[in-house]
Amino acid sequence: DLGHVDRVTDHLADAGMSVDVYDGCEREPSLADVADCIAFVRDETGGNGYDYYVGLGGGSCMDTAKVTRVVVENGGEPLDYVAEPTGEGKPITSSGPPLVLLPTTAGTGSEISPVAILSVEEQGIKEGISSNHVRADAAVLDPTLTATLPPELTAKTAMDALGHAIEGYTTHDYDSLLRASDPAERPVYAGKTPMTEMFSEKAIDLLSSNVRRAVHNGDDLRAREAMLQGALFGAIAGLTAGASLCHAMAYPVGNRYHTSH
């Protein structure tokens, strides 16, 4: 127990809010893992859901929070909103109540991502639930929440962030992609633009300049802050423009061998 949960719940209690805590998030959450969180919310709220949601943790915890909110709001189960042929491919029509995400790693970019990744264990694959309704309403980047991250995880999550930045920099150009006439039918990844290239370049600079300091001295909050900013900028680039082959290759490898993404 690192005390992060107590810090957040204490602040919420001071603001007069009643708080329920779900702490059953798993690494690389499966459909069953997320269904357990959804059942918790439905049981605690009589099926109505909460007025607000807060997700605290790494990418897996934040993705669990994102999926839970939209499934409780829209009904059904997670697989209903996974794209065909794995799932039903039902559209998500509402985001639901406000969701705030607080990352404890600098890497996944889940705090601003329109995608949540789940393991479909029965088929041995990873799939995403993708919609702009999946996005959080706000992200809080607090470097003190990452100061307790071990060196190995600091390095591994940094590589994920760097991957977002580099892949977003080298993916398809915006003008090269065909688009549906209905904006609602367009994918969340739009292709790279001069703006996403700018974010990629800044992300690469911040991450490459600070990763060694963050790995070797976890208490260096300036380095931790720079890593969070770099991860955010990399996510803005990669998750707007779209990732490329590296991320596509990482999903089956990670699902089979449980390697860090």
Image (cartoon, rainbow, N blue to C red):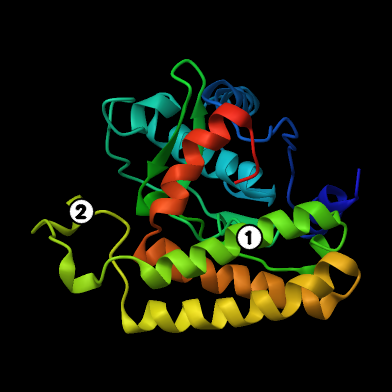
Front-most of 115 and 247? 247
Front-most of 38 and 211? 211
Q: Is residue 176 above or below residue 55?
A: below
Residue extending furthest left? 181
Q: Position of residue 231 (x, y in %)?
A: 61, 68
Front-most of 176 and 117? 176
Residue 218 visible at all: no
**Could you tell me if the residues under marks 2 and 1 are in contact, i.e. CB atoms within 8 Å?**
no
SS state under label 2:
helix
Residue plotted at (43% across, 18% down)? 123
Q: Position of residue 31 (x, y in %)?
A: 52, 25
Mark pair 2, 1: CA separation: 32 Å
Q: N-terminal of the two: label 2 or label 1?
A: 1
Quarter of the picture holding the N terminus = top right
Residue plotted at (87% across, 49% down)? 6
The residue indicated by pointer 2 is 184
Q: Is residue 23 above or below residue 98?
A: above
Query: Which disc is residue 159 wearing?
Result: 1
Mark 2 is surrounded, within 10 Å at the Cα level, by few (under 14), some (14 to 19) or many (20 or more) other residues, namely few
